[in-house]
Amino acid sequence: MQKINCMQNFIEEQGEDDSLFEHHRIKVDAGQSLLRIDRFLLIRLPHVSRNKIQGGLENGYVLVNDTQVKPNYKVKPNDLITVSLPEPPRNTDILPENIPIEIVYEDEHLLLVNKQAGMVVHPAHGNWTGTLVNALTHHFQNLPTLPNNDGRPGLVHRIDKDTSGLLVIAKSEQAMTHLAKQFFHHTIERTYYALAWGEPNEDKGTINAPLGRSQKDRRVVTVYDQEGEYGKHAITHYEVLKRLRYVSLLKCNLETGRTHQIRAHLKHIGHTLFNDEMYGGNAVLKGTVFSKYKAFVENCFKILPRHALHAKSLGFIHPVTGKEMYFETELPQDFKDLIDKWEHYLKYN
């Protein structure tokens, strides 16, 4: 009888467990301006919906300096914000997966990978397996991790899921630290090829426009009038490589490396990436109203069923030897086929 009672007590205790598990710990920057905490958390936690943040505040899951606050609380410099929920956070351990990867270069300190379009770089919301990091942890042991970057071993930068091209991976602590500094100081040379709607007026140009998460749709990055609370410094240089009447092949060089930088900047100047669904490039933005042309564009979308962006080259200083390193990749076949199809269309129309 005593054993039954003990087990019943254990089950009841498990069922009534209301302990909280810390999911996020945010130390507010010293230069942060006063901002409502619900708006602040929307910016800092882009994968968390407004409703979840509001619910967390109402239910006491969000504390500032260990004290429960209301949604209209104004975040101040150096505040310590913790977000805790009844369920434990997801384990950041990476499951090694035997996924083929294309290695362009490798030595004992680093490697260059040519990422295929469609592969997510690291595990995150909605993509916990099948990522480049899952593949890397299968092929390489003990990859280093940057501080506060758990679950992303070897990574010092990333590119979007549907962007193809080059990524440098650190294999040693020394390489990671040195490469991270080069990215921080914007001394890495990064070139992308993009097929964009329309033809820019000038053959070369620079887009200097602050970028940040949209307040209407957290998935999207938008341009802000000035740097500050929402917009961060962002500069993209571009050059027209080929004019194809209704689209243009552009070479883009990143001076900074913001999320969706090229995609948001090109949309801002009226030349959205071809077939970029998130930014409206998967519609006919330039050209005629004839059904034959619309059918042609739809066929182009099928040839390259993603946004037309490829990380073409990377240049940096080797973190150990000090040697200048430079790597290039060919455009993937779907990108080449897309350009060929546009050239053929212009030749006969």
Image: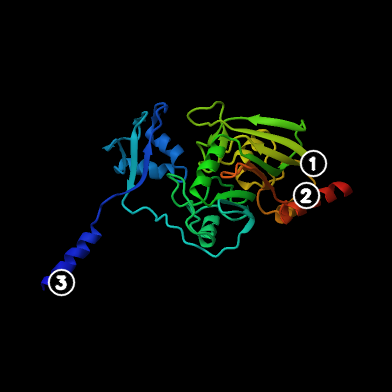
Alpha-carbon distance for marks 3 and 2? 73 Å
Q: Position of residue 242 (x, y in %)?
A: 79, 41
As helix, strand or loop, the secondary structure at mark 3 comes to helix
Residue at coordinates 57% horizontally, 63% vertically from top-left?
99
Q: Are marks 3 and 2 in contact (CB under 8 Å)?
A: no
267 lies above or below 112: above
Q: Position of residue 140 (x, y in %)?
A: 52, 59
Q: Which residue is mark 2?
A: 339
Q: Earlier in the sequence, mark 1 or mark 2?
A: 1
- Please identify the residue farthest to the front as the structure is shown: 321
66 lies above or below 340: above
- Amino acid type for the residue under numbered disc 1: Lys
- Please identify the residue farthest to the left as the structure is shown: 2
As helix, strand or loop, the secondary structure at mark 1 comes to strand
Alpha-carbon distance for marks 3 and 1? 79 Å
| Corner quadrant of residue 289 | top right
- Amino acid type for the residue under numbered disc 3: Ile
Give the position of the N terminus as an image quadrant: bottom left
The residue nearer to you, when weighing 203 against 297, is 203
Q: Which mark is residue 113?
A: none
Q: Position of residue 28 (x, y in %)?
A: 38, 33
Residue at coordinates 70% horizontally, 35% vertically from top-left?
238
Residue at coordinates 34% horizontally, 54% vertically from top-left?
88
Q: Are marks 1 and 2 in contact (CB under 8 Å)?
A: yes
Q: Which residue is mark 3?
A: 4
Pair 3/1: label in front:
1
- Please identify the residue farthest to the bottom as the structure is shown: 1
- Amino acid type for the residue under numbered disc 2: Ile
Q: Which residue is mark 1?
A: 242
Q: Earlier in the sequence, mark 3 or mark 2?
A: 3
Residue at coordinates 52% horizontally, 63% vertically from top-left?
97
